[in-house]
Image (tube, helix red, strand yellow):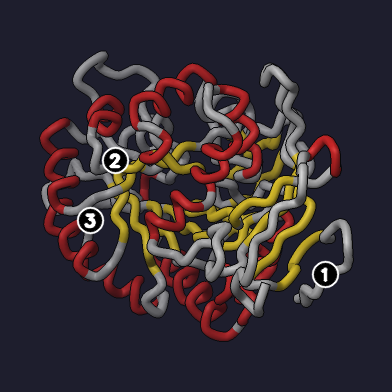
Amino acid sequence: MDGATIAAIDALPDSGDAEHGLPWLAPGLIDLQVNGFGGVAFNSPMLSPDQVAQVSLSMDAHGVTGYCPTVTTDGWQTLAHSMATIGLAIRTIPAVAERVVGIHLEGPYICPDDGPRGAHPRPHVRAPDWDEFQRLQELAEGHIRIVTLSPEYEAAPAFIRRAVAQGVLVAIGHTNADSAQIRAAVDAGARLSTHLGNGAHGQIRRHPNYIWDQLAEDRLVASLIVDGHHLPPSVVKSFLRAKTPQRCILVSDITSMAGLPPGRYEDTSLGAVEVLDDGRLVIAGQQQLLAGAALPITAGLANVVRFTEHGLRVAVEMASLGPAALIGHPSGRLEVGSRADLTLFRLAISADGSQVGSVEIVATVRSGRLVWGELLGEPVDVPRG
């Protein structure tokens, strides 16, 4: 590396992981949906710039070199405070500015019905309001890069066109839109389906429905939560076959409960929730209704390999190059001249592919600097910071 960029790439003679015991080297991961971590929620009237920095630095341990702080459906005061605080943190804390690739506003312009609404609070769900969005964008100092909404509202197409004209990526999610409404949203410029297959009714019409419509729309990229809890293996496999990996990206959708031990937590932005022993995050008192995710995006890497016929390269690209291209972020491609945003990790896979372990991050490098872990082998001139 030469400063922040890759200067040269050389292959080891007769290289092989089994022979050298080396980890995999991959582009840094990009997570476009992070609601919080380690007890810090971005939806909080008490959010501070230091807490934004705390979450941002926590991403290093998971191989994530860029992420979107995600603010979900809430009242005006909380949304305004969250946007202003994240914007301030980006402006004043270099570690935050280096890691945040944009803010994701998920809601409040979503479907109010049980099922599609998910765990978003019904009292704060509302129709798209361009003036309100502009005020939030101003408070965020222009850093809102993604907005997830439901196109079932009459005002949605005009809102989408205006957002796209300002460079905002518009996603369809938490929706009960019909075929015509989804088509109108895509015609207006929507390009992403937020966590497709989740934020949906327990039972829907077999066809047409809003899942089939988004699967069939080639202009839409689908983000998927492949933590082993949000989507069954057969659904992940079917979605990837229908959309192709080139039109799918991985997101974690982790909440403030990620990184915390199993147990019941009362005072969260979603009320009382439980982190179960298997990593599921649920509304307290039952085990079916999910309240977001608690596993990092690396869980999705292993599960794509575990659930589908696709190999590790495809899984890594769905969590790195794919989301980076979607949001227009300069990614850490393994090419001379590319930015040196890299992750080194281990993942045990049996020879026949039938057994897949968990991802273990060995090191994370951002812009040529070692920010987490240790580099193995001969000493290298990589500054830590």
**Does 347 sit above or below residue 93?**
above
Q: Is residue 69 left or right of residue 151?
A: right
Q: Which residue is painted at 56% across and 78% down in the image? A: 89
Mark 2 or 3, nearer chain start: 2
Relative to 275, does residue 212 appear above or below in the rendering?
A: above
Amino acid type indicated by mark 1: Val
Q: How dense is the environment of label 1, judged by Cα within 10 Å: few (below 14), some, or many (20 and up)?
A: few
Dot 3 amino acid type: Pro
The quadrant of the image that shows the C terminus is bottom right
Number of marks drawn:
3
Residue at the (47%, 40%) spot, across then down: 119
Give the mark nearer the N terminus: 1 vs 2: 2
Q: Is residue 366 visible?
A: yes
- Residues under labels 1 and 2: Cα distance? 52 Å
Give the residue pinned by disc 3.
128
Alpha carbon distance from label 1 to label 3:
52 Å
Disc 2 marks which residue?
111
Residue 109 placement (x, y as % from top left): 29, 51
Q: How crowded is the residue under tag 2: few (<14 C-alpha within 10 Å), some, or many (20+)?
A: many
Residue at 53% x, 78% y: name it: 90
